[in-house]
Amino acid sequence: MDLAAAKMIGAGLACIALVGAGIGIGNVFGSYLSGALRNPGAAATQSTNLLLGFALCEATGLFGLVIALLILFAF
Amino acid sequence: MAMALNPMEQFEVKPLIEQPILHIGSHPIFFTNQALLMLIVTIAASLFLTLAMSRRSLVPGRAQSMAEMSYEFVAGMLNSAAGEDGLKFLPFVFTLFIFVLFSNFFGMIPGSFTVTSQIAVTFALASLVILTVIVVGFIKHGFGFLMLFVPKAPIYLLPLLMLIEFISFCTRPISLSVRLFANMLAGHTMLAVFGGFVVMLGAAGGVLSFLSIAPMFLIVAIMLLEFLVAFLQAYVFAILTCIYLNEALHLHDHH
């Protein structure tokens, strides 16, 4: 297998990290929604934590994407 | 088939003036498109905040209430995350927030350059935050700041936990900078890739040219998402700064 093909496969594999990010973001919003429907009064106070959880989650997936881009363009 | 347009081309830093403007040692320093955008961002942010607040009317107009809202937003964030004595870092956190926010939003203008899509810029900002945290921690607590790495736990777990805490502290500048950089990079790359679809479909001719409308609408939707991300990443950068400052000020105990 030549190097170019291996790079492409590696970059594709690195994007599997986005699976975890998808599950995580779904979990963040799902849990927030189920919590907010049980106790609507407390929902507004937790929006900071919601956005923070969303951003932290999304970032872990994007780290994988950065690895893919590094494989493709940096090496 | 080769890509019609290279989606990474937009992140290229190129000198705007052929001649280097100064030399540090033998290393030439160029005035690049990134330097120009950073200059524009800084000037725009300072102009907006000074002009909006110049009238200082009791009943604020549109511009003044925008400036006041952004100020109160950051102040509230800092207060809730780091407590009353965290408020003396408001100028620092507010500057970071406004700089990142304006950079992200100026990057959304088609054809411009996103300053925060450069790891050099975001890592410089993140290391500034972490260095501030370390300096503040050592000034406030002396060597007691090292207790940050000692959580409340059974003694036989402590060596392992201290190692984990230390590693997690060391990865903070990396995660803080890579988060912002990767979000901006991924968003703008995605926009460019879908833009390439429009061009390729449009050039294909016949029915396919009409189909190029579809990715066009998708670009509009992604653009809206990117505006949300642009704000959200500035917000996350600022709130994480607040949280790290809180740890430096109060160690483990809550304010």
Image (spheres, grey):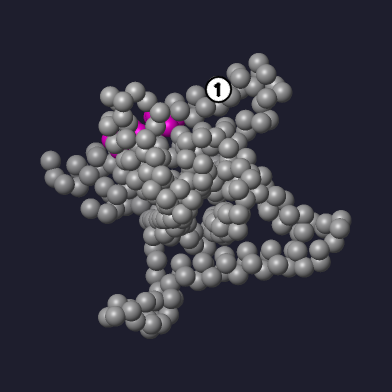
What amino acid does circle 1 point to? Gly
Front in this rendered view, residue B91 or A18: B91
Judging by the rendered image, the residue that carries numbered circle 1 is A30
Residue sitting nearer the eye, B162 or B177: B162
Magenta region = A13-22
Give the residue at x 41% y 45%. B145
Q: Please name the residue shown 53% across and 70% down the image.
A: B39
- Residue B189 visible somewhere in the drawing: no
Quarter of the image where one finds residue B14: bottom left
Q: In x, y percent, where is residue B130? A: 43, 52
> Where residue B70 sits in the image (x, y, percent)?
68, 52
Towards the viewer: B84 or B230: B84
Q: Describe residue B93's horizontal placement relative to residue B185 as left or right.
A: right
Mark 1 element type = helix
The residue carrying pointer 1 sits among few (fewer than 14), some (14 to 19) or many (20 or more) residues within 10 Å by Cα, namely few
Q: Residue furthest right?
A: B59
Q: Along the line of sight, which residue is nearer the eye, B75 or A1?
A: B75
Q: Residue at x 51, y 41 (%)?
A: B250
Q: Is residue A75 left or right of residue B82?
A: left
Q: Is residue B244 above or below residue A22?
A: below
Q: What x and y, as percent, mark residue A58?
A: 46, 37
Q: Quadrant of residue A30?
A: top right
Does A17 appear in magenta? yes
Give the x, y percent position of residue B169: 37, 43
Q: Quadrant of the C terminus of chain B?
A: top right
Q: Chain of mark 1?
A: A
Number of marks in picture = 1
Is residue B14 placed above or below B213 in the rendered structure? Answer: below
Residue visible at 59% across and 48% down in the picture:
B86
Magenta span: predominant SS is helix
Asked if residue B75 can be seen in this view, the reply is yes
